[in-house]
């Protein structure tokens, strides 16, 4: 049954509880047991750095869509499978199951026949970077609509397209690039390819949240912890904060509030994708700092903080653990993790490779939630 609340319909569950009652109960919770999450957008780099960052993700998520913008990029199936092997070697001994789900880096030269080959080898998706849009994207696509044959093949074999949704035109303001991408590229692409599944990754604006919510079921989006917790003041006010610089860049508070409303809606079209992207401290704190925020060390506590702010802790499990597998046509994880309301201070840095460190999101500050060690079967 349902009743009206402030002009909206409020659902009553068979046990007599309501959405508001559930949200209030969750707000008082000190312990949350949820299905083990997945990360549907993750960077783990390569080489010696893998063993520094992969354990952070493997400690809480069962699967991760791994981005292909390494050096050199993962542009074919052979490179993808070799990279998968290197990632699995970096998972600590005795760790519960962690499965890297590989992606191919789409270029202007990717052959159509590579798609079926990648699908057969278990590659999970293809990544579209507009050339020059973000870190290591120089090999990206210069004319998206000029790659229709390969996108048609992806639709044919049910290979999803993960999209970095920004234009790179120099005459478009950096804060407007997501909206312009939707209008100029994504909307025409969806109309041209009615069977292609598309994930608009790391959305940052009210425009994107509304577009995805109203789009067909074959369109979904990931949302990062930083875009739920921070706005552009957190980069610029009181001095430049290089460790808050990412692409897409943080936006106005009105856009952050729109993202909080999106996750609070409970829509299955939005799911967890950290875009955790580690860079050495020195590369961030430089005259031309790298774009990327590292969040794998505390992703679920950071998301819990955002969901609590939105009054939607009861929606966290679906966002983190149900919506992504449903969109990618995969089974939900069977194991669980436990969140406890327990303050802890995030370290100022973590080791990153042989001789470097990475500064994590929320470095030196307290978080309200922590993950209990161990994963429950």
Image (cartoon, rainbow, N blue to C red):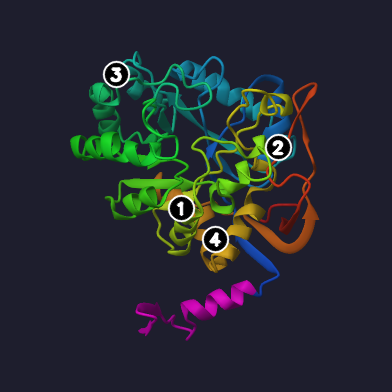
Q: What element does badge 1 sit on? A: helix
Circles 4 and 2, Cβ within 8 Å, touching? The answer is: no
Instruction: Give the class, few, some or many, for how many residues have Cα within 10 Å of label 3's Cα (few <14, many ≥20).
Output: some
Circles 2 and 3, Cβ within 8 Å, touching? The answer is: no
Q: What element does badge 4 sit on? A: helix
- Residue for point 51% across, 30% down: 67
Q: Earlier in the sequence, mark 1 or mark 2?
A: 2
Distance from disc 1 to disc 2, alpha carbons, whole Å, reads 32 Å
Q: Which x, y percent locates residue 181? A: 33, 36
Circles 4 and 1, Cβ within 8 Å, touching? The answer is: no
Mark nearest the camera among 1 and 2 is 1
Circles 1 and 3, Cβ within 8 Å, touching? The answer is: no
Question: Mark 3 — residue?
Answer: 112
Distance from disc 4 to disc 1, alpha carbons, whole Å, reads 20 Å
Image quadrant holding the N terminus, namely: bottom left
Q: Is residue 251 above or below residue 148?
A: below
On residue 55, which mark appears? 2
Instruction: Give the class, few, some or many, for how many residues have Cα within 10 Å of label 1's Cα (few <14, many ≥20).
Output: many
- Residue for point 64% across, 42% down: 295
* 74 relative to 53 in the view: left or right: left
Mark nearest the camera among 1 and 3 is 1
In this view, the residue farthest toward the front is 238
For the residue pair 58 and 340, the one nearer the viewer reads as: 340
Magenta-drawn stretch contains 293? no
Instruction: Give the class, few, some or many, for how many residues have Cα within 10 Å of label 4's Cα (few <14, many ≥20).
Output: many
Q: Earlier in the sequence, mark 4 or mark 1?
A: 1
On residue 255, which mark appears? 1
Extent of the magenta region: 1-27
Question: Mark 4 — residue?
Answer: 316
Distance from disc 3 to disc 4, alpha carbons, whole Å, reads 38 Å
- Residue for point 35% across, 78% down: 9
């Amino acid at each position: 049954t349902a009743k009206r609340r402030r002009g909206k319909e409020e659902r009553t569950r068979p046990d007599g509880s309501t959405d508001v009652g559930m949200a209030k109960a969750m707000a008082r919770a000190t312990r949350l047991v949820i299905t083990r999450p997945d990360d549907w957008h993750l960077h783990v780099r390569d080489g010696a750095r893998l063993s520094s960052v992969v354990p952070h993700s493997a400690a809480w998520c069962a699967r991760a869509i791994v981005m292909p913008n390494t050096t050199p990029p993962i542009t074919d199936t052979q490179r993808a499978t070799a990279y998968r092997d290197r990632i699995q070697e970096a998972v600590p001994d005795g760790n519960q199951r962690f499965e890297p789900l590989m992606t191919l880096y789409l270029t202007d030269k990717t052959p159509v026949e590579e798609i079926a080959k990648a699908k057969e080898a278990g590659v999970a998706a293809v990544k579209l970077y507009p050339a020059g849009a973000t870190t290591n994207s120089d090999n990206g696509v210069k004319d998206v609509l000029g790659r229709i044959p390969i996108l048609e093949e992806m639709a044919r074999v049910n290979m999803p397209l993960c999209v970095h949704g920004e234009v790179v035109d120099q005459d478009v303001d950096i804060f407007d690039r997501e909206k312009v991408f939707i209008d100029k590229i994504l909307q025409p692409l969806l109309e041209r390819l009615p069977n292609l599944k598309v994930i608009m990754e790391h959305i940052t604006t009210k425009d994107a949240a509304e577009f995805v919510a109203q789009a067909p079921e074959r369109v979904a989006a990931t949302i990062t912890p930083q875009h739920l917790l921070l706005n552009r003041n957190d980069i610029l006010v009181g001095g430049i904060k290089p460790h808050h610089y990412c692409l897409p860049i943080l936006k106005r508070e009105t856009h952050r509030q729109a993202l909080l409303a999106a996750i609070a809606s409970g829509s299955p079209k939005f799911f967890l994708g950290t875009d955790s992207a580690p860079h050495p401290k020195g590369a961030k704190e430089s005259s031309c700092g790298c774009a990327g925020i590292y969040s794998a060390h505390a992703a679920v506590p950071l998301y819990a903080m955002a969901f609590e702010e939105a009054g939607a802790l009861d929606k966290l499990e679906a966002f983190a653990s149900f919506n992504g597998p449903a969109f990618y046509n995969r089974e939900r994880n069977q194991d669980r993790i436990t969140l406890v309301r327990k303050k802890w201070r995030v370290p100022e840095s973590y080791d990153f490779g042989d001789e470097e460190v990475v500064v994590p999101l929320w470095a030196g500050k307290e978080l309200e939630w922590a993950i209990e060690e161990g994963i429950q079967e």
